[in-house]
Image (cartoon, rainbow, N blue to C red):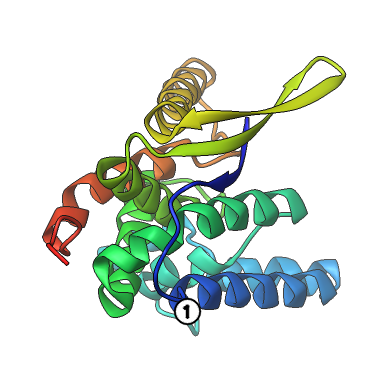
Amino acid sequence: MFPLYDENPTRITPYITYGLIGINVLVFLHEFSLPEPQLNQFLHLYAVIPRELSAGFAGIPVNQPVPEWQTLITSQFLHGGWWHLISNMLYLWIFGNNVEERLGSLKYLIFYLSCGVFAALCQWFVGMTSGIPSLGASGAIAGVLAAYVMRFPQTRVLTLIFLGFFATTIRVPAVILIGLFIVQNVISGLATLQAAASMSVQTGGVAYWAHVGGFVFGLILAPVFGLFRRD
């Protein structure tokens, strides 16, 4: 299921949402232009490396020019591939504008980055000794989805679904669409924990617990930032 358009128009131009999308695209194009050795170095420098973040929190030098705590923010603008980028930006474009309107642009930016930081910390918490880079805007966008579903649960979203070799569109209430997103991530996150425990190895792939953490903190922070303020 892929959201295409929601039926809730905004009365403002969502400059922050558009700006975040633009920055993510530009950073990814820079990634795409790098040869593989330089790309690996770039990602190692600006993505969250859990074991290095753990060392940083413990006061142990890791000999990196970028302090590890700063990667909690820089990692939010990195992506591992075209589909990773496109799917994230699609969700941000559809759901971010209404949340930006409700919070106000400055509060929305702080809210977005804060959800991303807490999301990265959740992923770090379940794998503190991992050397696998954690990156992407998914955690911050999960926070935006949480704010959206609280404020506009019955808004219908035009959604693309695949039925075998065929595709069609239906209008799905936001609460169902986003609810399926978070349930899928909880199940997948639990599966990755079980696999890691049984195999005694590090697991890579999608940072499911960043999605869950971003969503939970979005539920907590959005009302604090004024999601339900009166016009």
Q: Residue 24, image x and y in percent? A: 61, 70
Q: How many marks?
A: 1
Q: Is residue 49 above or below residue 174?
A: below
The answer to whether residue 25 is above or below residue 98 is below
For label 1, count other residues whose C-alpha is less than 10 Å away and answer few (under 14), some (14-19) or many (20+). few
Q: Dot 1: what SS?
A: helix
Residue 185 in view (yes/no): yes
The quarter of the picture where the C terminus appears is bottom left
Give the image location of residue 229, x and y in percent.
Answer: 13, 62
Q: Which residue is mark 1?
A: 15
Q: Nearer the viewer, residue 49 or 105?
A: 105
Identify which residue, 46 or 143, lies in the foreground.
Answer: 143
Q: Position of residue 217 (x, y in %)?
A: 25, 48
Position of residue 188 measured from the top left corner of the image (x, y, whole percent): 50, 24
Residue at image coords 52%, 57%: 92
Q: Residue 61: name its quadrant.
A: bottom left
- Is residue 110 left or right of 67 when viewed as pictured? left
Residue flagged by tag 1: what amino acid is it?
A: Tyr
* Residue drawn at x 12%, y 62% as measured from the top left: 230
Q: On the picture, is 133 further left or further right than 227?
A: right
* Residue 135 appearing in the image: no
Question: In the image, what residue occupies the spot 53% across and 53% down?
Answer: 94
Residue toward you, 40 or 122: 122
Q: Residue at (66%, 75%) from the top-left corner?
A: 27
Q: Residue furthest bottom?
A: 65
When the figure is inspected, residue 9 is found, relative to residue 152, above or below; the finding is below
Point out the image quarter for the N terminus: top right
